């Protein structure tokens, strides 16, 4: 079997004595790598004065090769073009996107520099799998260095309608770059259709297919059951005093719809006062991308909203919202999912949202909680047992919460069972296998045909 080369913005290099990695991408790919020789290449997550040759770590059959960015590269490539321009645009948030030509130039230069560092490490029969929007021009950069290996690409986030992507000044050039890949993988059919339409406008014929990312649901269910007996979970359970837990877990990101969610919860307390004192909403949202101004503003907005809602509805012995911006280990969160009555996952747009899937996997089948899910999360296409809401409308969130809180056990079990079956049909390993089989089946590689 040929070696698999994974390229991603962040590389989860195992640290001595640390457990498995927590991020969705890392967890999903770890399964795909099992039993196969692999090279994982990308940014180390560090900044260094003069980035040089990749630093190499080998663990079992996987070699990790990482490069640092210098300060200006981090600003232009990561904070600037990736997170300040592409991220909002790909999440349909034109108004938040910042367009600075020099960021785009640095972003492209980093892609070129990384490609030049990877090229000498490649073997002729390697298969490459590149991940995420930071690396849109990566195959084009490798091709210009003469690399002819098969190269696939997977986008973990949404792809917007063609007319929206066209607002990006460098949009056409980026679409042309995508033509250097042999296969383009998206999370949903809707994303795939949007990208196909955009590519048609620049005459790129690379195949585009949907491969919804899966997860190891049986493993997560076992972790959740174990975590339910851990001190942290017990502490949380005891502190609820018999109230129903509504749980939100997200990176602190404006795509997650947190202000709308907070307002939705406030609307629940206002319009359905019978739930006051009977529920507690815990939102865990670890700070993320703090170097980008919009993220700092979001944090301030949420601090204020949480304070206002607690001020308005709180009582001497009941705090409606518990709000945490610290990160917690995935194993601890698994236990929190298990004891939650409601998983509240309402991104305004999301590629997949693995938290929604984790909530489903963590439930006790005999007495499961209910998922209230945005219909604009990729997961909504698979989790038909969830209560789907429009996350832009706080009243609809409130109504969804009310229905979920009043739902009878038989109905909860029926919905949870259907969602568990959907998860069982799509593990992370299945997802990776489907993508790699499709990549293998693509016609003559763009590079090799040259
Ligand atoms: O989901 C897209 C993504 O870029 C992931 O690849 C990444 O783990 C996550 O968002 C967090 O972003 P960042 O790497 O910028 O912290």
Image: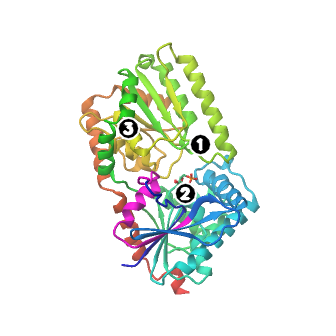
Residue 120 vs 399, above or below: the answer is: below
**Image point (51%, 49%), residue name:** 350
Question: Which residues make up the magenta segment?
Answer: 18-42
Residue 429 x %, y %:
35, 62
Label 3 SS = helix
Please name the residue that numbered disc 1 is placed on: 254
**Image point (55%, 21%), residue name:** 310
Residue 177 vs 363, above or below: the answer is: below
Residue 196 x %, y %:
52, 65
Please name the residue that numbered disc 2 is placed on: 159
**In this orientation, does residue 167 appear?**
no
Please name the residue that numbered disc 3 is placed on: 337
Residue 201 x %, y %:
61, 68
Q: Work out which quarter of the rendered image holds the N terminus and state it.
A: bottom left
Label 1 SS = helix
Residue depth check, mark 3 versus mark 1: number of the one nearer the observer = 3
Dot 3 beta carbon under 8 Å from ligand 1: no
Cα distance in 3D space between marks 2 and 3:
29 Å
Residue depth check, mark 2 versus mark 3: number of the one nearer the observer = 3
Cα distance in 3D space between marks 3 and 1:
22 Å
Q: Is residue 218 left or right of residue 119?
A: left
Q: How was this image coloured?
A: rainbow
Dot 3 or dot 1: first in sequence order is: 1
Q: Is disc 3 surrounded by few (<14), some (14 to 19) or many (20+) residues within 10 Å?
A: many
Cα distance in 3D space between marks 1 and 2:
17 Å
Q: Quadrant of residue 416?
A: top left
Q: Work out which quarter of the rendered image holds the C terminus and state it.
A: bottom right
Q: Quadrant of residue 125?
A: bottom left
Dot 2 beta carbon under 8 Å from ligand 1: no
Residue 149 x %, y %:
49, 80
């Amino acid at each position: 079997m040929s070696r698999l080369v994974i390229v991603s913005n962040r590389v989860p290099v195992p640290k001595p004595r640390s457990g498995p990695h927590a991020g969705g991408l890392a967890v999903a790919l770890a399964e795909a790598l099992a039993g196969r020789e692999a090279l994982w290449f990308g940014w180390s997550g560090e900044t260094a004065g003069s980035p040089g040759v990749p630093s190499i770590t080998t663990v079992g059959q996987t070699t990790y090769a990482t490069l640092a960015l210098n300060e200006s590269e981090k600003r232009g490539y990561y904070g600037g073009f990736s997170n300040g321009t592409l991220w909002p645009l790909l999440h349909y948030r034109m108004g938040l996107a910042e367009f600075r030509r020099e960021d785009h130039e640095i972003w492209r230069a980093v892609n070129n520099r990384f490609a030049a560092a990877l090229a000498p490490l490649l073997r002729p029969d390697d298969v490459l799998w590149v991940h995420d929007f930071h690396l849109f021009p990566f195959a084009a950069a490798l091709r210009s260095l003469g690399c002819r290996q098969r190269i696939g690409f997977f986008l973990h986030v949404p792809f917007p309608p063609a007319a929206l992507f066209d607002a990006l000044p460098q949009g056409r050039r980026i679409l042309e770059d995508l033509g250097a890949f042999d296969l383009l993988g998206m999370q949903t059919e809707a994303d795939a259709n949007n990208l196909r339409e955009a590519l048609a406008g620049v005459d790129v014929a690379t195949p585009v297919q949907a491969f919804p990312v899966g997860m190891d649901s049986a493993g997560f269910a076992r972790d959740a059951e174990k975590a339910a007996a851990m001190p942290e979970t017990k502490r949380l359970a005891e502190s609820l005093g018999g109230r129903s837990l509504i749980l939100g877990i997200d990176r602190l990101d404006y795509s997650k719809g947190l202000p709308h969610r907070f307002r939705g919860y406030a609307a629940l307390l206002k319009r359905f006062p019978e739930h006051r004192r009977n529920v507690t909403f815990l939102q865990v949202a670890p700070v993320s991308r703090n170097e980008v101004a919009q993220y700092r503003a979001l944090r301030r907005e949420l601090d204020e909203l949480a304070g206002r809602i607690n001020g308005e509805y709180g009582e001497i012995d009941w705090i409606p919202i518990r709000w945490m911006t610290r990160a917690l280990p995935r194993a601890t969160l698994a236990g929190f999912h298990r004891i939650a009555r409601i998983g509240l996952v309402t991104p305004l747009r999301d590629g997949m949202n693995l938290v929604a899937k984790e909530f489903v996997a963590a439930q006790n089948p005999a007495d499961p909680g209910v998922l209230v899910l945005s219909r604009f999360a990729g997961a909504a296409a698979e989790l038909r047992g969830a209560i789907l809401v429009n996350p832009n409308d706080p009243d609809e969130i409130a109504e969804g919460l009310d229905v979920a809180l009043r739902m009878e056990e038989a109905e909860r079990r029926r919905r949870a069972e259907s969602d568990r079956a959907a998860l069982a049909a799509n593990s992370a390993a299945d997802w990776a296998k489907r993508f790699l089989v499709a990549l293998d089946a693509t016609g003559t590689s763009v590079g090799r045909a040259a």
